[in-house]
Image (tube, helix red, strand yellow):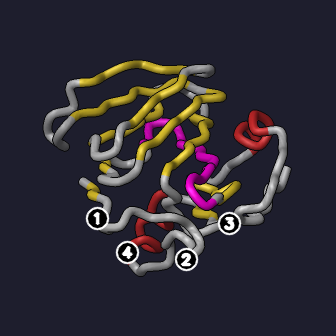
């Protein structure tokens, strides 16, 4: 199933199927004015990368696999630690350091909803390394038509 991010236009698709079929680290599936949906596939033993989004709340939903969620107020103070699996939801408040690690024996398939919009529309990153390179080079910025916080604060990565 191929999803084309058409920007802030009405859209409908089988989200569970799209999530389960996604093989890319991150693929932006829909970008609205205020929020965004990305599909993610995390290989066995890998993670999304420890990070904090000062102005972005996140909702994550696992559709396949097993993971370990760690969150906290500082990158060296991850006092929230839970094992999660297919069907679980994870809520990440803005400014919270967080990471999700695949602890299972199959890819961890999940989707993430960001508010506000966090990535360039229709952006696809095959791997975590691709995503990091693109972000560092300024190639993964929210679209100008999205509503962003008045004061832009950069994400933090460990």
Does the magenta-highlighted stretch encompass residue 156? no
Task: Mark 2 and mark 1 in contact? Answer it, CB < 8 Å.
Answer: no
The residue indicated by pointer 1 is 153
Ranked by sequence position, the earlier of labels 1 and 3 is: 3
Percent from the top left, x then y, of residue 86? Answer: 61, 21
Nearer the observer, 123 or 154: 154
The residue indicated by pointer 3 is 122
Q: Residue furthest front?
A: 150
Ranked by sequence position, the earlier of labels 2 and 3 is: 3
For label 3, the SS is loop
5 on left or right of 38: right
For label 1, the SS is loop
The residue indicated by pointer 2 is 144
Percent from the top left, x then y, of residue 58? Answer: 46, 42
The residue indicated by pointer 4 is 136
Q: Which residues are magenta?
A: 33-47
**Which residue lies at the image location 47% right of the left edge and 73% below the top edge?**
134
Where is 104 relative to 133, above or below?
above
């Amino acid at each position: 199933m191929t999803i084309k991010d058409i920007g802030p236009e009405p859209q409908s698709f089988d989200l569970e199927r799209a999530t389960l079929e996604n093989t890319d680290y991150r693929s932006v599936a829909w970008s609205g004015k205020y929020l965004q949906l990305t599909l993610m596939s995390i290989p066995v033993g890998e993670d999304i990368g420890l990070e904090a989004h000062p102005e972005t709340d996140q909702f994550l939903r696992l559709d396949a696999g097993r993971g370990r969620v760690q969150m906290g107020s500082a990158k060296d103070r991850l006092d929230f630690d839970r094992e999660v699996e297919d069907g679980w939801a994870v809520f990440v408040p803005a400014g919270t350091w967080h990471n999700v690690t695949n602890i299972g024996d199959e890819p961890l398939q999940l989707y993430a909803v960001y508010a506000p919009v966090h990535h360039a529309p229709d952006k696809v990153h095959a791997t975590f390394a691709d995503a990091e390179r693109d972000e560092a080079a300024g190639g993964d910025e929210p679209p100008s038509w999205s509503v962003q916080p008045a004061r832009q604060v950069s994400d933090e990565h460990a």
